[in-house]
Image (cartoon, rainbow, N blue to C red):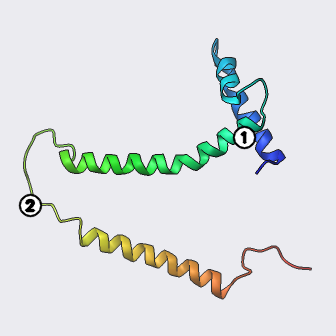
Amino acid sequence: PWGQMSFWGATVITNLLSAIPYIGQSIVTWLWGGFAVDNATLNRFFMFHFLLPFILAFMSALHLLFLHQTGSNNPLGLKSTSSMIPFHPYYTTKDLVGALLLIFILMLLALAYPSLFLDPEN
């Protein structure tokens, strides 16, 4: 993880922020934790990449909680249940069947054709 690709990726992407007038260079220096990409910079970026999925999962769960409590957008305030179907078991079953189908296809590719995506041998 500490290779040239990480170093130059962090350098190029953070230097894009230096194009922001007046505050760009300050933002880059703050992100780097110094005046150049260093060990601290890569540690920060790896920590960010580790924590981002957990933050997104928490925000999605919070969004679903609030949506469940208040309901969807209904500007007229009408309580119409004639066109509604329950989420469980209909959509739960649909999602489960789709996920199982994808897992089956992945297992078929992995077990029946293990060298499908490998480099050809001489």
Q: Is residue 29 above or below residue 94?
A: above
Which of the two residues, 119 or 11, is positioned nearer the viewer here? 11
Upstream in sequence: badge 2 or badge 1: 1
Quarter of the image with the C terminus in it: bottom right
Residue 71 in sight from this viewpoint: no
Q: Which residue is mark 2?
A: 82
Which of the two residues, 44 or 5, is positioned nearer the viewer here? 44
Kind of element beneath mark 1: helix
- Categorize mark 2 by other alpha carbons within 10 Å: few (<14), some (14-19), many (20+): few
Q: Which mark is residue 94?
A: none
- Categorize mark 1 by other alpha carbons within 10 Å: few (<14), some (14-19), many (20+): some
Q: Is residue 69 above or below residue 118?
A: above
The residue that appears at 72% across and 79% down in the rendered structure is 116
Q: Position of residue 52 (x, y in %)?
A: 53, 46
Q: Position of residue 110 (x, y in %)?
A: 64, 81
Q: Residue at the right extreme?
A: 122
Drawn side of residue 45 relative to residue 51, left or right: right
Q: Quadrant of residue 108?
A: bottom right
Count the numbered circles shown.
2
Kind of element beneath mark 2: loop
Disc 1 marks a residue whose amino acid type is Leu
Q: Position of residue 12 (x, y in %)?
A: 75, 34
The residue that appears at 15% across and 61% down in the rendered structure is 84
Q: Which residue is mark 1?
A: 42
Q: Residue at the top extreme?
A: 22
Disc 2 marks a residue whose amino acid type is Ser
Q: Residue at the bottom extreme?
A: 112
Q: Quadrant of residue 41?
A: top right
Q: Position of residue 9 (x, y in %)?
A: 75, 41
